[in-house]
Amino acid sequence: MAMEVRDSLEITHTGEYLNFLKCYFRAFSAILYHITKPQFADNPEHKLRNIVVEILNRLPHSEVLRPFVQELLKVAMHALTTDNEENGLICIRIIFDLLRNFRPTLENEVQPFLDFVCRIYQNFRATVTYFFESGAVSAPVAVLGSMSSSTLSSSVGGEDVRPMELSDPICPSAGYVGQLNPSTRSFKIVTESPLVVMFLFQLYGRLVQINIPHLLPLMVAAISVPGPEKVPPHLKTHFIELKGAQVKPQFADNPEHKLRNIVVEILNRLPHSEVLRPFVQELLKVAMHALTTDNEENGLICIRIIFDLLRNFRPTLENEVQPFLDFVCRIYQNFRATVTYFFESGAVSAPVAVLGSMSSSTLSSSVGGEDVRPMELSDPICPSAGYVGQLNPSTRSFKIVTESPLVVMFLFQLYGRLVQINIPHLLPLMVAAISVPGPEKVPPHLKTHFIELKGAQVKQLLSVALVEQ
């Protein structure tokens, strides 16, 4: 009967929608709360629960639904926190859509979801241990008679391994036939949660201060879990889901500077193997976002990330290159303004050294100006000396200008078509940057910035010479 109801859902788009809800909503709730129990194997009871959850997900979010919204949210939360991964993913979609479409009245219902997210992050290391160290997940015994050729191809080919957007179709994890992960032990659930969390923080600003101090360390800890060094074939899908779960939290534009530093560094350390390929385009978008909006320190790491991703996955990424070249044009357009800011505006004052918090080696490095030469991509990255505690934006950084030409030249070698498109605009900007004279007299506290300026101009001169050849 549940299948018949699902196949007749067009009634919800007619004037009978309210009568449909009055007739069936309590029955659906009873099935999920009392009549059936969460299942962790693919059996008839799971199929019934799955059909009911799917019906709830397909209900139109019109005003007719509003009287049922709070109860529907509670039902979805109950299923998410107690059911298996397959039903849990659908419930995340239900929760997200309800919060998005009925936001004015549902702030009080949000905290239980955030508590659940905290719990799955608390369990993250244990989940990694379960899949990769405990031996609980054995190699699957494929039941060929019950699998179509397309299903087998999908399972073996690993096409269900990329991070899932909320709009994607939902299907169970590959790995072992007939067994379903609990939602509390699912990398896919972890992957989908940050998008909803960030939406909730934008929607209900009051929740940020309440939850960030607890949630942030848990997300950072989850990102830091290394996973196994060797992955047997039957665990490959779970490993890729693990990496997808670790990548997704990094997409949040989090207000905590410490987290951004950690996230950028972890992005930089991701191994560039074929396992990473499904996530490369999203990683490039994240690195580009951080490069264009973050500080100089993180921007330098992001240049390295972009360079390595383009170098290692070059065959498929030509379309992702132009945004980087547009950014380079912008920093050259701003070059004269950057020089004015540092040397003429008086905005950069002499630093007040806090000796109590600086070791002798730190003080020596800061005063001695050891971090002033043009930085190669292989160099360790550390913030500019000059003024304590203040970080330059990446769009106002001589170091960023210094490092950009190496990537630009590599891209022009890799994608020749881009040369004709970009050189007519980029070359005059580079020449103009070389021509900016800089100050005649440099006070001691601006010496480092002056050396960085000259390093940037030397790098541009070499690049222009190469381009003209």
Image (tube, helix red, strand yellow):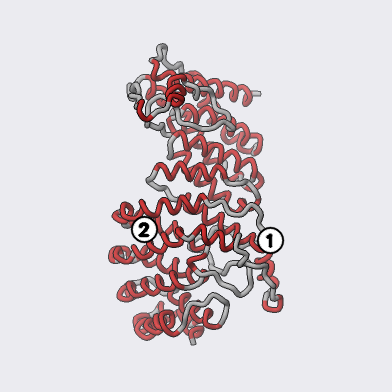
Q: Which residue is depicted at the point 65% across and 57% down? A: 231
Relative to 259, does residue 97 appear above or below in the rendering?
below
> Circle 2 sits in a helix, a strand or a loop, which is it?
helix
Q: Which residue is depicted at the point 47% across and 80% down? A: 37
Residue 432 can be seen, yes or no = no
Q: Amino acid at mark 2?
A: Leu
Relative to 387, does residue 251 appear above or below in the rendering?
below
Residue 333 lies, in percent from the top left, at 46, 29
Q: Please state if 63 lies on the left or on the right of 290 as rendered.
A: left
Q: Which residue is depicted at the point 40% across and 16% down? A: 444
Q: Which residue is depicted at the point 42% across and 27% down? A: 359
Front residue of 236/91: it is 236
Q: Amino acid at mark 1?
A: Pro
Judged from this view, the residue extending furthest toward the bottom is: 1
| Alpha carbon separation for disc pair 1 and 2 | 38 Å
Res. 193 image quadrant: bottom left
Label drawn at residue 233: 1
Front residue of 6/234: it is 234
Residue 104 can be seen, yes or no = yes
Q: Please state if 212 lies on the left or on the right of 315 as rendered.
A: left
Residue 98 lies, in percent from the top left, at 37, 67
Q: Tag 2: Cα neighbours inside 10 Å, few (<14), some, or many (≥20)?
A: many
Q: Please state if 456 lies on the left or on the right of 139 as rendered.
A: left
Q: Quadrant of the C terminus?
A: top right
Choose mark 1 or mark 2, whichever is in front.
1
Res. 339 image quadrant: top left
Q: Where does label 2 land, which residue?
A: 200
Residue 187 lies, in percent from the top left, at 53, 61
Front residue of 116/131: it is 131
Q: Please state if 433 lies on the left or on the right of 22 as rendered.
A: right
